[in-house]
Image (cartoon, grey):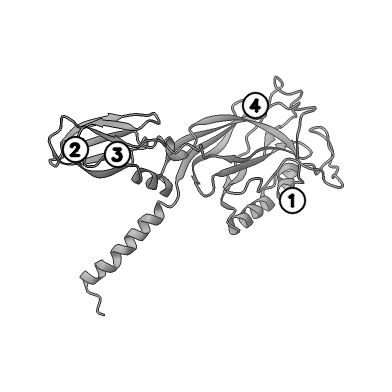
Amino acid sequence: MKTTPKNLKKCILPLLILVVTFAWSQSIGTYDISLTTIWNSTDHTSVPGSAHWSPLIGATHNTADEFVSLGTNATTGIKDVAEFGSNGVFTTEINNSITASRADQLLNDGFSPFAGNNSIAGFTDVTISEDFPLITLVSMVAPSPDWFIAINSLNMRSGNPAVNNGWKDTFTMDVFVYDAGTDDGVDYSSVNAQSTPFVPVSMITGFPINGNRMATVTFTYKSSTLGIDDVSAIENVKVYPNPAKDVLTITNTLNIIDSAELYNVLGKRVTTVTSISNNDLKMNVSNLRGGIYILKLRNQEGDTSSRKVIIN
């Protein structure tokens, strides 16, 4: 068959629909991540000379404890980060997880913050996929035998689809220090003494850190996109009865709908109801003239769905 411009349009349209559907297959949250040091004599027994951290490195992933886990032996990549501040092997481990579809991106800021308050490292505009909502970040505490800070398998999804499309709002959390279990040193200045055999990763609760936090990390929520589940949810909201006479009810048991606006056929808004509760929205239509109207539903993220409503 000869492909004419008209036929070409017929071919392209289904493709465009497919592309749009795929683009909404998962929600994306965007964050700034900043790690602020708290490494001083007030909070810790001692602070070594030239105290610093190695460049922050990590990944977003979908399998808990993918890269590090309390109570299990450290990987070679974690060992190298904790002992030498070297990210090469750990980068390979992350890339292997990406290939195996257990992770989707490497995070590496390339900056080594120094000890003391308010030395900051981090990332700007990190996009986190709903399919890979966990984040892990590690950095060497230097100098040290095999100690590192870690944020392990932090889930960035909130479980509440009505706010930020299900992504956590801005928050700050404490960061603590862990022993990789690969070196027997007990102080910042201990000489190298490889553990044989290695022992499981553990939190350092004794001297010289005494279980104190070493930093804080702030995840600043910036924006998000709507996932297919959220699109389906707003599209599946029930509106009844239709035709309606006195009251139009809009189901909102999942706290999806934030407002509902009713427009006449001329495009004039004739009534509005708003709610942020889990109760159904009730719209009084008893004073409206009979005819066809357009109901526009909107969630708290500004996404909308339109319905045709008949008023008797």
Position of residue 247 measured from the top left corner of the image (x, y, whole percent): 24, 32
Labels 2, 4: front one: 2
Which amino acid type corresponds to the residue marked 4 in the rendered image?
Ile
For marks 3 and 1, the one nearer the N-term is 1
Q: Which mark is residue 76?
A: 1
For marks 2 and 3, the one nearer the N-term is 2
- Give the CA distance from mark 1 to mark 4: 27 Å
Which amino acid type corresponds to the residue marked 1 in the rendered image?
Thr
Which amino acid type corresponds to the residue marked 3 in the rendered image?
Leu
- Residue 249 placement: quadrant: top left
Residue beneath the point at 46% across and 41% down: 30
For marks 2 and 4, the one nearer the N-term is 4
Which amino acid type corresponds to the residue marked 2 in the rendered image?
Tyr
Q: Nearer the viewer, residue 223 or 239?
A: 239
| Crowd class of label 1 (few under 14; some 14 to 19; many from 20; radius 10 Å) | few
On screen, residue 252 above or below 232: above
